[in-house]
Image (spheres, grey):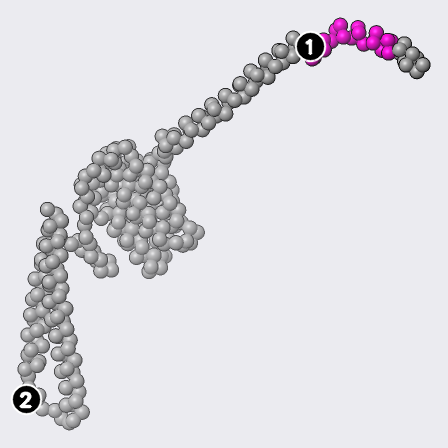
């Protein structure tokens, strides 16, 4: 009986819904569902192609050519890093002054004129001299010339300048955190610019050429380049010095003690002690001079064979 009472209400509801269905098509009709499926398929296809194009774009942007720094800009960063107080280098302690001298040596060592050309070589030599004198103002003015020279440098000059900047920059890096970190800023700029210059396309020709190693002896501020001729001259000087010290030692040894007169027993003991010390000193000098002479002769032979 209850179901019979619900039938009229259900029929009224269906009759009220049917006009709306004429204006609003059901979203799950068969044809509409086919279109929806097709839309989803094309959307999925487009969605899958987007990551591929994104990966390609990322790969393209990470190529070395797009991220290679401009050497002129890096040289300008070196010039900016030398914007220091006029007495900055002069205030360095002794250990940092030695590092600054080493940086000056690395910057101008070797055939700088042949590798870098006249203008750049003069600038590097003057800059090296300014570092040795701890002249900050002159250093700043000379470093400021490097960005202006970059456009006129040949491949050989760029490669040589790059190697020298990297070597000198590592000397500044070894100074540690001095002051407000200015030395580390200089080191970072010099190393970055040096690597960029050395990595230029024309540096490959330089790498194929045989590089001549220059051996150098350093005695504080004195630096002497070793060549076969200088080694032989040093061997001759050491040999002459060995003969002189040997003659002096033999002269002391052959002097009889009875030929000398002493005031008392204490003076006699003092004279004997001094005589023994002098004999040991001169015989030791003779031995060391002879060994030095022989070592320099062997070094000259080795350097001569390396040059051949």
Element marked by disc 2: helix
Query: Could you tell whether 175 is left or right of 205 in the image?
Result: right
Q: CA distance from mark 1 to mark 2?
A: 139 Å
Q: Which residue is mark 1?
A: 29
Query: Could you tell whether 180 is left or right of 273 in the image?
Result: right
Specify the segment rendered in magenta.
10-28
Position of residue 256 measured from the top left corner of the image (x, y, whole percent)? 6, 86
Query: Could you tell whether 153 is left or right of 282 in the image?
Result: right
In the figure, 147 relative to 2: above or below? below
Q: Is residue 297 magenta?
A: no
Quadrant location of residue 282? bottom left
Observer-nearest of 288 and 9: 9
Q: Is residue 22 magenta?
A: yes
Magenta stretch mostly in which secondary structure? helix
Q: Which residue is mark 2?
A: 259
Element marked by disc 1: loop
Position of residue 306 measured from the top left corner of the image (x, y, whole percent)? 13, 49
Name the residue: 33% across, 36% down. Answer: 71
């Amino acid at each position: 009986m209850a179901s019979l009472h619900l039938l009229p209400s259900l029929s009224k509801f269906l009759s009220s819904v049917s006009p709306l269905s004429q204006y609003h098509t059901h979203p799950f009709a068969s044809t509409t569902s086919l279109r929806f499926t097709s839309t989803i398929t094309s959307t999925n296809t487009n969605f899958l192609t987007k990551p591929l194009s994104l990966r390609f774009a990322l790969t393209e942007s990470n190529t070395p050519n797009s991220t290679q720094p401009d050497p002129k800009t890096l040289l300008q960063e070196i010039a900016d890093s030398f914007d220091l107080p006029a007495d900055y280098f002069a205030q360095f302690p002794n250990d940092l002054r030695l590092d600054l001298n080493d940086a000056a040596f690395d910057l101008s060592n070797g055939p700088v004129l042949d590798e870098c050309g006249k203008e750049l070589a003069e600038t590097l030599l003057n800059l090296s001299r300014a570092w040795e004198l701890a002249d900050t103002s002159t250093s700043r003015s000379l470093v400021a010339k490097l960005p202006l020279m970059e456009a006129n440098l040949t491949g050989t000059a760029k490669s040589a300048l790059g190697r020298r900047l990297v070597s000198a920059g590592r000397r500044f890096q070894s100074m540690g955190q001095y002051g407000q970190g200015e030395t580390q800023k200089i080191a970072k700029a010099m190393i970055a610019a040096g690597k960029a210059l050395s990595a230029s396309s024309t540096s490959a020709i330089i790498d194929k050429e045989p590089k001549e190693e220059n051996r150098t002896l350093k005695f504080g501020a004195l630096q002497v380049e070793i060549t076969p001729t200088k080694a032989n001259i040093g061997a001759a000087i050491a040999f002459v010095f060995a003969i002189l010290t040997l003659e002096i030692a033999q002269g002391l040894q052959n002097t009889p003690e009875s030929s000398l007169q002493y005031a008392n027993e204490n003076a006699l003991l003092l004279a004997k002690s001094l005589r023994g010390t002098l004999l040991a000193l001169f015989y030791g000098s003779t031995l060391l001079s002879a060994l030095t002479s022989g070592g320099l002769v062997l070094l000259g032979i080795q350097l001569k064979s390396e040059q051949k």
